[in-house]
Each structure stands twice: as structure tokens, then as C-alpha cells.
Amino acid sequence: MREPKTYKTEGIVLKRINYGEADRILTIFTKHYGKIRVMAKGVRKLQSRKAGSLELFNHATIFLVKGKNLDLVTEAQVVNLFKSWRRDLIKVGLAYYFCELVDKLTPDNQPQTAVFNLLKEALDKINSETPSILVRNFEEQLLDELGFGIPQFLKQTKGSLKEYIESIIEKSLNSPKVLKNLN
């Protein structure tokens, strides 16, 4: 049996890259397909109906059609804009950090519902929890869910696990630099 040409999924926009004059390539962490990269045609045009639904950090229901290289977004509907913290740069920085971790630590096209739920929950809690506690809990739970674990000597420390995560991905993270500049 052939795979359907169109499908629907729920996802959180992790990253976006402008492409051409009016398009964007989006990295979306989805509930059922894991991390996927998709093309949103015409989304940068002023009259685009999809634009508001496909902003960074948005939780949306996305309708897609299979493409040759990238699947194409045909429609998107917002589930949660996380409007309550969008105007606070520190909180936006936290969302950027969470999304960057998920983007860098997860492989493409590997369904990981628990990671999706963890990210969604962390974005929900940005307004209500102490940032340092929220960050540490997110880091620990994400590393545990992905099977990396945390070395014993780091379990006693209270700070961020940023250096350990950077050693796993063998690259430096961009978002902590943003957060540092905001403080």
C-alpha cells in the first residue's frame, strides 16, 4: 500500500530559514513524526494566511503534502501562541534555548512523543516557573528521554548542563549567548 500524499500533524516550530523571496524552510518538532524540515511557500508575503501560525515557538496543527525533497505546508492552524510570554525577552530566550536543545539533540524523522510533550510543557511553564529550575528540569528530562543520562558528578550541581550538552553535540549552543546578553 502506498503512503498517503497528504498528512496532518501537530508540531512546534523550532527554527526557520528564509528561502527565496517569499518562502521559508521550517524545522518543526512534531508529535508523530519527530523533527521534520518542511517548506512553507509564500509564507513571507503580507497576505499569507499561514504566516501567523508558523512563527517561532508556535504550537500548531499543520497540513502537509509530500514533496520531492521537502514536504510542503498547505495549511496551518495555531493551537497555542504562548502569547503570555512573547513580549518578555528573557522568556523568549528560554524558549529559544529549549527549542535549540531539541533541534540539536534529536535526529530527523524519529517519532518521539515524549520529547514533544516535554517541550510543549516547558513552553507552557515559562510564565509560571523559576527560570533556573525550569531550565535544569528540562535539560535533565530531555537528556534522560534521549538516553544520554547525566554523569554522577553533574547530578550534584545546581547549574545548567550547558557544557555537558555541548560536549554531546560537539558544537557550542547559540541561545545561552543570547540569554547572557539579556541579563
Image (spheres, grey):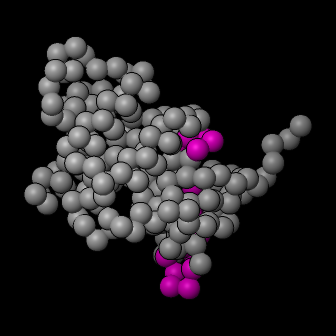
Q: In which quarter of the image is the N terminus?
A: top right
Q: Residue at x 25, y 16 (%)?
A: 151
Q: Which residue is drawn at 40% across and 68% down?
A: 83
Residue 74 is situated, as x and y percent measured from the top left of the image, at: 68, 66
Image spot of residue 103 (x, y percent): 41, 43
| Magenta stretch: includes residue 71 | no
Q: Where is residue 148 in the image (x, y as percent from the top left)?
A: 37, 21
Q: Residue most toward the bottom?
A: 47
Determine whether 83 is above or below 183 in the image: below
Residue shown at 42% from the left, 58% from the top: 57
- Residue bounds of the magenta highlight: 31-48
| Residue at the limit of the structure toward the right, as seen here | 1
> Which secondary structure class fits the magenta region best?
loop
- Asked if 137 appears above or below 85 in the picture, the reply is above
Residue 7 visible? The answer is: yes
| Residue 125 placement, left or right of 152 | right
Image quadrant holding the C terminus, namely bottom left
**Residue at point 20%, 43% (across, down):** 132
How many numbered markers are drawn?
Answer: 0
| Residue 49 as seen in the image, left or right of residue 101 | right
Q: Residue furthest front?
A: 128
Nearest to the observer: residue 24 or residue 75? 75
Residue 136: x and y, percent? Answer: 25, 36
Residue 36 visible in the snapshot: no
